[in-house]
Amino acid sequence: MKDFTDLVRALTGLTWPVIFGLIAWRLFPTLKDIIRSRGFTVKVGQTELTVQEMSEQVLRTTAEIQSSLANVSAERAPEVTPETRALRAILWVDDHPENNTYEAEQLRTLGVTVKIAKSTAEGKRAINATSEPFDAVISDMGRSENGSNNANAGLDLIREIRDQGYDVPIFIYASTRQAGRISEITAVGGNGATNSVSQLFKLLRGVGEFPRDAD
């Protein structure tokens, strides 16, 4: 009898998890649609915002902060800014562009067009296909090229761009170790390297003003 009682108690303990699991399974498509549509809301002070509205405001704010920091740096060192012009278009080469989504969206918020390429070959095609030249190129260092890992893909990209006679500023945006290879990067014609988003914005600001700042 004791064994039977223990069995009933054990089954009873499993009842709620099973019921919850069934409910979650039945509601999963609906929950997925809600998450995809960013239908949740967040209360900020007396205002209720959707997650999408909140994320857009955070993106705008951080983009403005990055821009302000870059502008302060440019004002302190005017000699690094060759001319006053707008930084309108950037080519960003990285086989994992999702890792740079936030940085790219910050630039777009500031009025910069960001073209994404996932390989050196794709980047070269983008350069050759555009009617208006890019104002800067950003690249990671190591990436998958033609089915194998190329630890020096960033250097190869710089070489190939320079061999075409294209003098666009090129920056490596990668890990601390890879960005530390600055002597190799500049030796093949690169213009800088960093693993910091704020430093990246400073490097770009050294090329030209962000369009929203120039307007």
Image (spheres, rainbow, N blue to C red):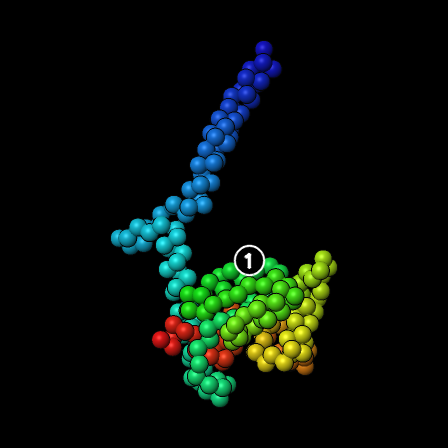
Q: In which quarter of the image is the N terminus?
A: top right
Residue beneath the point at 56% across and 22% down: 10
**In the depicted view, which residue is nearer to us: 41 or 2?**
41
Residue beneath the point at 49% across and 88% down: 79
Residue beneath the point at 41% across and 47% down: 38
Residue 132 rendering spot, x and y as whole percentages: 51, 74
Q: Name the residue under label 1.
A: 98
Residue 151 rendering spot, x and y as whole percentages: 70, 66
Label 1 SS:
helix
Look at the image and tell me whether residue 190 can be seen. Answer: yes
**In the depicted view, which residue is nearer to us: 151 or 130?**
130
Q: Quadrant of the C terminus?
A: bottom left
Q: In this view, does 143 lie above or below 161?
A: above
Residue beneath the point at 46% across and 73% down: 88
Would you identify the image quadrant in which residue 187 lies?
A: bottom right
Which amino acid type corresponds to the residue marked 1 in the rendered image? Glu
Look at the image and tell me whether residue 177 can be seen. Answer: no
Would you identify the image quadrant in which residue 44 lies?
A: bottom left
Residue 34 rendering spot, x and y as whole percentages: 42, 42
Q: In this view, does 52 lie above or below 178?
A: above
**Left or right: residue 151 compared with residue 111:** right
Question: Label 1: few (<14), some or many (≥20) within 10 Å?
Answer: few
Residue farthest to the top, as pictured: 1
